[in-house]
């Protein structure tokens, strides 16, 4: 194995330019690691729910913060896990057609859809979410969902972060799709 390919997966197309494989592998590893890290957000959420249930039903002393903590942590868990779901192919697709297509056809359709819908949509989503986050930060916006009224801007900051993570993973998915469209083979 030569130095140029020693960090590439064995499944990489041997005819692929090393910089493309390196780009895709780097992005995919980042998304896999960040997705694994974000999965652990579920632990404090479960602890908050368990604390609230015990506090409410055993001691008859409900908290004022558990509802807010729970929806914010679950929303964060869901949003930040979206790029990981994209990496793993867990987003919705019309598989009854897609599964019968060749790698080249899948690549053509996917590359087209990434360019026409995904990137413009995610860029718009990022820009609008960023504006909402900045506005919430500027005015010190608080949640109206409970008497605790926590600051809401950290939660709103998760939305543009999720869009950015999706955009980054979208680059990897587009490169893989474009390679399949051009060659009829999978990149990695």
Image (cartoon, rainbow, N blue to C red):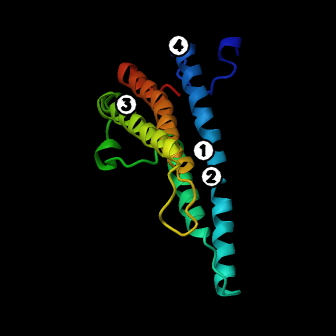
Question: In front here: 177 or 27?
Answer: 27
Asked whether, in this view, residue 36 is left or right of residue 91, the answer is right
Residue 18 at what x, y percent from top left? 57, 14
Real-space Cα distance between discs 4 and 3? 24 Å
- Please tell me which of labels 4 and 3 falls first in the chain: 4
Residue 33 at what x, y percent from top left? 65, 39
x 64%, y 54%: residue: 41
Question: In front here: 102 or 98?
Answer: 98
Residue occupied by mark 3: 119
- Please tell me which of labels 1 and 4 falls first in the chain: 4
Where residue 44 is drawn, which disc sits there?
none
Residue occupied by mark 1: 35
- Please tell me which of labels 2 and 3 falls first in the chain: 2
Real-space Cα distance between discs 4 and 2? 33 Å
Q: Say if 40 sits above or below 55 in the image.
A: above
At numbered mark 2, what does the secondary structure look like: helix, strand or loop?
A: helix
Asked whether, in this view, residue 80 is left or right of residue 120, the answer is right
Where residue 17 is drawn, which disc sits there?
4
x 71%, y 86%: residue: 59
Residue occupied by mark 2: 39
Q: Are marks 4 and 2 in contact (CB under 8 Å)?
A: no
Real-space Cα distance between discs 1 and 4? 27 Å
Q: Are marks 1 and 3 in contact (CB under 8 Å)?
A: no
- Please tell me which of labels 1 and 3 falls first in the chain: 1
Q: Are marks 1 and 2 in contact (CB under 8 Å)?
A: yes
At numbered mark 3, what does the secondary structure look like: helix, strand or loop?
A: helix
Question: In front here: 184 or 66?
Answer: 66
x 62%, y 48%: residue: 38
Residue 17 at what x, y percent from top left? 52, 13
Quarter where residue 5 is shown: top right
Real-space Cα distance between discs 1 and 2? 6 Å
């Amino acid at each position: 194995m030569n130095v140029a390919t020693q960090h590439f997966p064995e499944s990489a197309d041997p005819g692929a330019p090393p910089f493309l494989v390196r780009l895709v592998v780097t992005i995919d590893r980042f998304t896999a690691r960040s997705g694994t890290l974000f999965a652990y957000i579920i632990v404090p959420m479960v602890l908050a729910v368990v604390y609230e249930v015990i506090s409410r039903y055993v001691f008859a002393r409900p908290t004022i913060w558990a509802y807010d903590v729970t929806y914010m942590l679950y929303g964060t868990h869901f949003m930040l896990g979206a790029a990981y779901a994209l990496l793993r192919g867990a987003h919705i697709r019309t598989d009854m057609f897609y599964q019968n297509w060749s790698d080249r056809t899948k690549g053509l359709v996917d590359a087209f859809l990434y360019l026409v819908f995904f990137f413009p949509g995610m860029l718009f989503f990022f820009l609008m979410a960023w504006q909402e986050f900045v506005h919430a930060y500027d005015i010190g916006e608080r949640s109206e969902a409970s008497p605790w009224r926590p600051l809401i801007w950290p939660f709103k900051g998760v939305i543009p972060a999720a869009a950015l993570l999706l955009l980054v993973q979208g680059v990897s998915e587009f490169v893989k799709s474009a390679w399949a469209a051009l060659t009829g083979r999978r990149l990695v």
